[in-house]
């Protein structure tokens, strides 16, 4: 079952005199998708690191399902939240199936325990991400896009209630980008994701959070938030917007300021 996420007055910096994100507050309702956008260096990945428990906040609170994740045991958090990071993982000395199976570790009673249920969940994820034919290949031998799909599959088999994704469409061709967006729409979990592509963001989001210089500069539904003025302020580009003829979602083209 999906959980809600509440972030309150969140701050983080590498030292007391320098904060990368400042006073971040927002809510994500259970089962909805929030897309975070902003220019490089806006603080998007830094924000996610405090939500999936990599960077302990210097101030503020992150609550999932009413519980402060920084007050919970790490094992409980790993059953609640899964993360897919922007950086491609190092070349594991494992097969694709073994990498995907790592997502089941939080649900096992011991390091060597295993169940038939695990196999079914793993097989389904391999099929969903078109990895079944690659299951016995070394992870290190995959292309960048194939590695990204394997890491997404690993997160899905973790069966989290909240999934956090940092640029999950990086390294993917157009077809697989669209498939990932379609998969994220169908997940029975809460989704928090950063994307560079504003057209993909508009296609996926229930809510868009726009960041600039470590703060929120806009928050709301795509049509209300992804306006030419907001895009100019956040990205320093000019934007023209129309509606996608099939979905009715915002669609953008861009140019440098004159």
Image: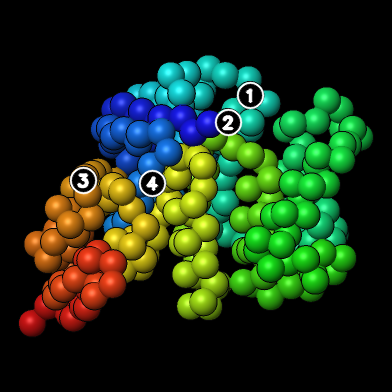
Determine the residue located farthest toward the front in the rendered image: 246
Q: Is residue 78 above or below residue 76?
A: below
Quadrant in which the C terminus appears: bottom left
Q: Secondary structure at mark 3?
A: strand
- Lower sequence index among marks 3 and 1: 1
Check residue 216 in the rendering and tell me which mark sits there, or answer none: none
Q: Are marks 1 and 2 in contact (CB under 8 Å)?
A: yes
Mark 2–mark 3 distance (CA, rounded to whole Å) = 25 Å
- According to the picture, the residue beneath numbered tag 4 turns out to be 33
**Residue pictured at 21% horizontal, 78% vertical:** 254
State how far apart marks 2 and 4 are (Cα).
Answer: 16 Å
Tell me the residue that label 2 is attached to: 80
Q: Is residue 73 left or right of residue 65?
A: right
Q: Is residue 4 visible?
A: yes
Which residue position holds label 3? 220
Q: Earlier in the sequence, mark 2 or mark 4?
A: 4
Q: Looking at the picture, how far across and down is residue 186, in whole percent?
A: 49, 52
């Amino acid at each position: 079952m999906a959980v809600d996420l509440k972030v309150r007055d969140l701050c983080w910096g590498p030292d007391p005199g320098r904060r990368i994100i400042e006073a971040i507050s927002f809510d994500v309702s259970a089962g909805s998708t929030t897309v975070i956008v902003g220019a490089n260096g806006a603080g998007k990945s830094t924000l996610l690191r405090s939500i999936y428990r990599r960077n302990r906040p210097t101030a503020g609170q992150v609550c999932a399902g009413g519980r402060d994740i920084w007050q919970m045991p790490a094992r409980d958090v790993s059953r609640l939240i899964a993360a897919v990071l922007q950086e491609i993982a190092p070349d594991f000395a494992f097969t694709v199936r073994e990498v995907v199976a790592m997502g089941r570790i939080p649900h096992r009673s011991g390091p060597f325990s295993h169940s038939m249920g695990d196999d079914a969940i793993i097989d389904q994820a391999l099929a969903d991400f078109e990895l079944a034919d690659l299951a016995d290949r070394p992870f290190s031998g995959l292309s960048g896009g194939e590695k990204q799909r394997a890491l997404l599959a690993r997160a899905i088999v973790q069966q989290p209630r909240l999934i956090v994704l940092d640029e999950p469409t990086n390294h993917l061709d157009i077809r697989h980008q669209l498939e990932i967006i379609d998969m994220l729409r169908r997940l029975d979990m809460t989704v928090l994701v950063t994307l560079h592509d504003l057209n993909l963001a508009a296609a996926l989001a229930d809510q868009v959070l726009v960041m600039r210089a470590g703060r929120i500069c806009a928050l709301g539904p795509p049509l209300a938030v992804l306006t030419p003025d907001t895009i100019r302020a956040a990205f320093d580009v000019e934007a023209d917007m129309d509606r996608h003829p099939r979905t009715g979602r915002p669609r953008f083209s861009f140019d440098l300021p004159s």
